Amino acid sequence: MKNKLKIGIIGLGTVGCGVVKVLSRFDDIEIVSAAVKNLTKKRDVEVQTITNNPMDIVTNPEIDVVVEVAGGCEILEALKVAVQNKKHIVTANKELLARHGAELFDLARENQVAILYEAAVAGGIPIILPIKTSLAANKFSFVAGILNGTTNYILTKMEQENLSYEDCLAKAQKLGYAETDPTGDVEGFDAMYKIAILANIVFGKRIDVNKIYREGITHITSNDIKLADELGYKIKLIAQASELESGELDIRVHPMLISKENTISDVNNATNAVMLKGFPVDKVLFVGPGAGEFPTASSVVGDILSIKSEFDKTGEILPMTTCHHSVYANQIEIEKTQNCYYLSIVAGNNLGTIGKIGSACAEFGINLSSIIQKGINEDNKASIIVITEKSSEADMNKMVEKLENENDIKVINKIRVMQ
Ligand SMILES: NC(=O)c1ccc[n+]([C@@H]2O[C@H](COP(=O)([O-])OP(=O)(O)OC[C@H]3O[C@@H](n4cnc5c(N)ncnc54)[C@H](OP(=O)(O)O)[C@@H]3O)[C@@H](O)[C@H]2O)c1
């Protein structure tokens, strides 16, 4: 056994600096070198050697483990070279794994190296290793989560302070919870990458990230949040994957109304949560910090220590954590899914409007759970809220189209309701 495990880090940003700080507590791990983009940038950590070329790290014969905390997909080629050079990988890069995981894991298997990624899905919440080890006895039917801290923060502030989406986004940007370009978070891309990774390990199949239905939170209004609250719900951005009886997978990311009786509705601000349902364990819920310098470093350093514990072993290391599946899942389109819906409708203050909504629902076989008229506003329009029982997305879309063709009826928002 070597005395020290030698590490090379690609990226010294939020997570990379956290990793360097946490690793300073471990005498038996040495950071040999780090790669960054901008060599002149001031950083609050020091590393022996810094380069602006990731290839220097992945080809350095002294380095045993490459820690990739740079982000994005342009780092793929460097990581492939690292694997070919028999270096183990620890990464926090959800986008890279969701888009190119299959290729990278195949290469890792060929080269008998480990790729660990505990930080990629829920930051500081341990979820990958528990699914692969402690929960290995289970057949899972469902996984869902609040996997994006930025959107959860925005929705929480909209609810608690009765502010608009735009005001809460500005607040999140000021506090560093949202980036200047927030698209990746608010349009659901970040949560989509994470649910792709989770579905992959929970259902043991490869996932095509391009087939995941994705909808962000930019269309959610403070009025929706207020009305949902009055009906006993909160609105959260949910990423979920379930296995149907046919064996197909239903994987999507979109906002949902969640009953206040469901524990996940209490997961607020930037906190993340992952729910799993499987046999024999039944339902389990993991809650904690989904991002941030130290929570994320906790997961990255945990992975480094796992590799260290088996380092120098001959053959496959950490066999329970290795990705062995190669078959792609059969993923269904959103039109084929079954959901309950919340509809927020604005209509002229005319006789028979509620009747028209009722008959449009009946025409497409959609049962109403409740329909409430919220009075008449200043411009003589009625605000109507509908909650439906389960129906197909395709039928719901046809029904909404029919209502939109009625004079003076406008469907402002359609949000799915968690069962
Ligand atoms: N932030 C979190 O809380 C969090 C949580 C979970 C997972 N993650 C994931 O962790 C990764 C890093 O996130 P972060 O927030 O630490 O990002 P960040 O603060 O933007 O830092 C990225 C670092 O990577 C360096 N870098 C970028 N491209 C590079 C390249 N081609 N070659 C060399 N260095 C490069 C940057 O160099 P410069 O400093 O010179 O620009 C910077 O030091 C991402 O995959 C992210 O999704 C982050």
Image (tube, grey):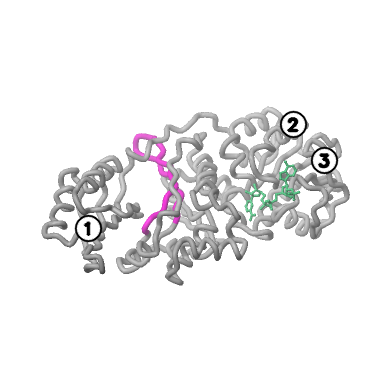
What residue sits right under mark 1 in the picture? 347
Residue lying farthest to the bottom in this orientation = 161
Task: Tell me the number on the disc at residue 81.
Answer: 2
Q: Is residue 192 left or right of residue 316?
A: left
Query: Gap in Å between the C-alphas at discs 2 and 1?
Result: 61 Å
Residue 278 in sight from this viewpoint: no
Q: Is residue 299 left or right of residue 365?
A: right
Asked if the stretch drawn in magenta spans residue 241, the answer is: yes
Q: Nearer the viewer, residue 25 or 157?
A: 157
Q: Is residue 352 above or below residue 212?
A: below
* Element assignment for label 3: loop
Residue 247 in sight from this viewpoint: yes
Instruction: Tell us which disc is closer to us: 1 or 3.
Output: 1
- The reply to whether dot 2 and dot 3 touch (C-beta < 8 Å) is no
Crowd tier of the residue under label 1, counting other residues whose Cα lies within 10 Å: few below 14, some 14–19, many 20 or above = many
Q: Is residue 54 above or below residue 303?
A: above
Query: Which residue is drawn at the image coordinates 62% and 39% (left, top)?
Result: 96
Q: The residue under label 2 is which amino acid type?
A: Val
Considering only order in the chain, which callout, 3 or 1, is on the residue closer to the N terminus?
3
What residue sits right under mark 3 in the picture? 63
Residue 359 placement (x, y as % from top left): 14, 49
Q: Which residues are magenta?
A: 237-257
Task: Tell me the number on the disc at residue 168.
Answer: none
Considering only order in the chain, which callout, 3 or 2, is on the residue closer to the N terminus?
3
Asked if the stretch drawn in magenta spans residue 99, the answer is: no
Considering only order in the chain, which callout, 1 or 2, is on the residue closer to the N terminus?
2
